[in-house]
Image (tube, grey):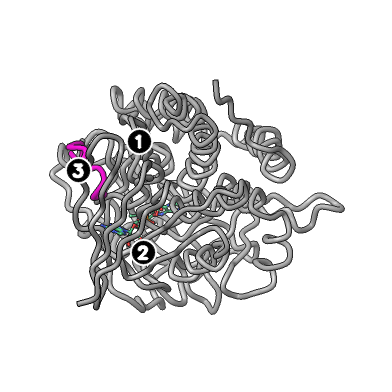
Amino acid sequence: MALEKINTSICIIGAGPAGTSTSIFLSKLGIKHIIVDSANFPRKKVCGDGLDLKSLRMLNHIDPKIIPNELLNTPDFTPSWGFRIISPKGVNSDFILNPEKGYEKRVPFIVSKRIIFDNFLIKKLDSSTADFRQGTKITSISKEGETWTLKASTADSELTITCKLIVGADGDHSTVLKHLGDRKVNRRHYIGSVRQYWKNVSGMSNHNLLEIYYPKNLPMSYFWIFPLSNGEANVGYAITNEIAKNFNLNIRETFKEIIEKDPAISHRFKDATPIAELEGMGIPVASLQRKVVGNGWILVGDAASMASPTSGEGIGTGMMTGYIAAKFIEKGIKANDFSEVVIGNYSREIFKRMKLEIRNYNLSLKYPFIANLVANYLIGNNFISRFIVNYKFRGLLKTCYEKEVEVELE
Ligand SMILES: Cc1cc2nc3c(=O)[nH]c(=O)nc-3n(C[C@H](O)[C@H](O)[C@H](O)COP(=O)(O)OP(=O)(O)OC[C@H]3O[C@@H](n4cnc5c(N)ncnc54)[C@H](O)[C@@H]3O)c2cc1C
């Protein structure tokens, strides 16, 4: 078996949206690094496949031409012009964000199967600064002084990487977190989730709306139908793990019951057929505020438990942590020092952007039924929900397409 040794300053472990974004933004800063992933791309990832405003904002940071020129003219990426909330009685409230004149390409959401989207990001890696190794699994991590030694294996070789900084971008089952002794699932800050691809779900909107249904008696949970091209849809259900445990609820069974028996939903599936297995996975959410940075290490994306606690969306937050991490890595390089004293404010910078979501989620955890009632009231109240969409959401859309994320390093 061939043996290879690599010495570099920075090693990114994992090439999902968080790892690839870290790499792309490091490359933009001219910083050389290695990025490894155990999978060979294109690879699958269980997900709702919804790209939210944070994801689109990060794509605009990579290159503002990506959305209009590369994503909006291929069926692999489905533009979605708003969302639909389905009430427990089966009544639809549609929130359509018709593009303003002159801004026809400012789409608020895109749906794309992860096997396609993640591979799209891989193609954006800059080989002049990023040494990308796929099919390369990190199997052990150790540290002596300030130097990390990572052992990795590929199908036919062994690799030893020595570096000064590791970026843990290796997802929910992070090997880096295991090494740091911090890979413990906290049910209160973990969402159990399943999804399945279906064909011919009836009543889909012409505007490709993202559809969300909050089952009345199951707080802190939601069912979704996200449109894809060719009459396909990504259908799923998510619930905070602790609530599922308290209700003694089986997530897969609940998903099937909603499709088969729930009067608000089941009629939509009469002529629909599943076209893939039902698959499940956890989502580690940011309300835990995990330790995400230390001497010579930074965590991004799911490895940092960074998914939004209120929506479960982690692609955009993962990409955003990659963007912010790259700025702190540049700071470490300039100081020739990757100690926590130099890069530690990374933690403040990522969590300050999630403050409201973290607060709302933690409040809901305390009073889940009251939170559910309030959510249903707000959603059901036409005036309030239209105000939120027309005022708040349009503002966010403008930010997404016009404003750079500002990072305070000191
Ligand atoms: C059912 C479900 C629905 C979801 N729906 C949405 C949604 O609609 N929108 C949204 O924004 N988010 C959604 N999420 C969350 C989203 O999928 C994650 O937050 C996102 O994938 C995190 O990206 P990441 O780059 O941190 O991790 P990942 O995408 O998991 O990437 C981690 C990478 O690390 C690699 N890796 C792991 N271990 C090693 C190792 N030892 N050596 C080398 N490489 C390794 C893996 O191969 C993988 O490629 C959903 C999640 C689930 C489970």
Disc 2 marks which amino acid?
Answer: Lys
> Which of the two residues, 89 or 181, is positioned nearer the viewer here?
181
> Which of the two residues, 164 or 59, is positioned nearer the viewer here?
164
Instruction: Identify the residue under disc 2.
Output: 45
Residue occupying image coordinates x 37% and y 49% = 169
N-terminal of the pair, mark 2 or mark 3, is 2
The residues bearing labels 2 and 3 have C-alpha atoms spaced at a distance of: 23 Å
**Residue depth check, mark 2 versus mark 3: number of the one nearer the observer:** 3
Magenta region: 174-184
- Residue 207 pos. (x, y %): 65, 62
Disc 1 marks which amino acid?
Answer: Gly
The answer to whether mark 2 is within 8 Å of ligand 1 is yes
Asked whether residue 286 appears in the rendered view, the answer is yes
Instruction: Identify the residue under disc 3.
Output: 179
Asked whether residue 280 appears in the rendered view, the answer is no
Q: Is residue 177 magenta?
A: yes
Q: Residue furthest right?
A: 102
- Residue 383 pos. (x, y %): 64, 32
Instruction: Identify the residue under disc 1.
Output: 296
Q: Is residue 24 above or below residue 342?
A: below
Using the rendered view, name the quadrant where residue 14 is placed: bottom left
N-terminal of the pair, mark 1 or mark 2, is 2
Q: Quadrant of ligand 1?
A: bottom left
- Density class for disc 1 (Cα within 10 Å; few <14, some 14-19, many ≥20) is many
- Residue 394 pos. (x, y %): 70, 40
